[in-house]
Amino acid sequence: MTLSKEQILRYGRQLILPEIGVAGQQQLTHAAVLIIGAGGLGSPAAFYLAAAGVGTIGIIDPESVALSNLHRQILHTTEAVGSPKARSAQARLEALNPHVTVIPIQERLSAANAADILDAYDVVVDGSDNFSTRYLVNDAAVLLGKPLIHGGVVHFGGQVMTILPRQGACFRCVFPEPPPAGSIPSCQEAGVVGAVAGILGSLMAHETLKVLLGLGEPVVDRLFMFDGMTSRVRDVPVRRNTQCAVCGEQPTIRTLMELEPLCAGTA
Ligand SMILES: [Zn+2]
C-alpha cells in the first residue's frame, strides 16, 4: 500500500520523523485500537489516534451524551446531547479524518462480550470510569495477550500505565483487589478537571502509538502519576507480582468474571 498525495500532506509532519516515516504510517493504517469509553480520557485519546491515522478505531460506550459531560468529554458537541456517545464519537472522528474506519459499539462491556470484542484489536485503551470495568478489561487483555493502556482521572489528578501482558506488571499486579465499595466516590459525585483528563488521555494516545510502532520506552512497570495542583509528575516503579491472580505463576482467574459495579477514577 502506498500513501496518497492527500495522506502525504495530512501526515507530513509525522512522516518526516525518521522514527515513523512511511513504514510507520503504513503500520498505523493497518492497526486497530479499541477505546473503552468515549468520555474524559477516551475523547482526547480517540482524537489523537484518529488524527495520527490509526486505520480502525473501535469505541465502546453504552451511554448517551449528557450536558454535564461536555466540560471534559470533548468528542461530543452541545448538539449531540441525548444521542449515543459511540455514534457521536464516530461522527466527530470521521469528520477529523475520513481515512479512519470508526466502529461504534453501543454496549456495556461485560464478562460475556469482552473477549469477543477485544479480540479484534491490536491495542486496548481503557478510559472507563469504574473499577468493575477496569478489572474486567485488565483480565481480558492479559488472557488474550493484548497490550493495554490503563488510565484513570479524578479530581485534579490521574495516572497512566501501559500493560504488556506477561512482559510487565498488569493492573492487578499493582492493585490486587478493588477498594472497598464505600471508600470511593460514586461516578456521579466525583469531581474532575477537564484539562487534567485531557493531559492523561493524550498520554494514553501517545503510549498507544509507541506500542503500535515499537518506539521508545512505554510506561511499562511504572505508574505515571500526574498531580494537577502542582503540575508535578511522579514515576512510581511497579513490578509483576508472582502471586497475581491473572498473570502470576498460579493464576486463579482463567475465565472472565464480573465485579459488582464500583465507581471512581483512580485507584
Ligand atoms: Zn498481573
Image (spheres, rainbow, N blue to C red):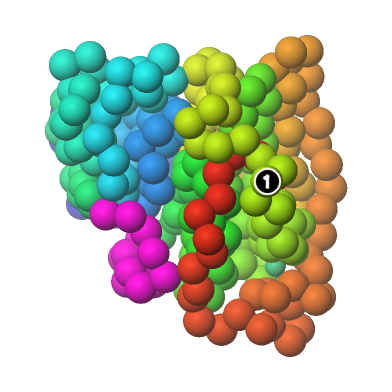
* Location of residue 154 in the rendering, given as x and y in whole percent from the top left corner: 61, 29
Which residue occupies the extreme front position in the image? 182
Q: Residue at x 70, y 75 (%)?
A: 245
What number of labels is visible? 1
Q: Quadrant of residue 122?
A: bottom left
Side (left or right) of 122 relative to 150: left
* Location of residue 29 in the rendering, given as x and y in whole percent from the top left corner: 29, 47
Q: Is mark 1 within 8 Å of ligand 1?
A: no
Q: Residues within 10 Å of mark 1 (few under 14, many from 20)?
A: few
Helix, strand or loop under label 1:
helix
Side (left or right) of 237 relative to 53: right
Q: Is residue 23 above or below residue 114?
A: above
Q: Which residues are magenta?
A: 107-121
Q: What kind of residue is marked 1? A: Gly
Kindly tell me whether residue 211 is visible in this rendering: no
Of 249 and 263, nearer the camera is 263
Residue tagged 1: 182
Is-magenta flag for residue 126?
no
Of 53 and 121, nearer the camera is 121
Q: Quadrant of residue 135?
A: bottom right
* Location of residue 86 in the rendering, given as x and y in whole percent from the top left corner: 24, 40
Of 213 and 42, nearer the camera is 42
Q: Residue at x 61, y 67 (%)?
A: 165
Quadrant field for ligand 1: bottom right
* Location of residue 37 in the rendering, given as x and y in whole percent from the top left corner: 39, 42
Name the quadrant of the C terminus: top right
Q: Is residue 136 above or below residue 49?
A: below
Side (left or right) of 88 relative to 126: left
Which residue occupies the extreme bottom position in the image? 250
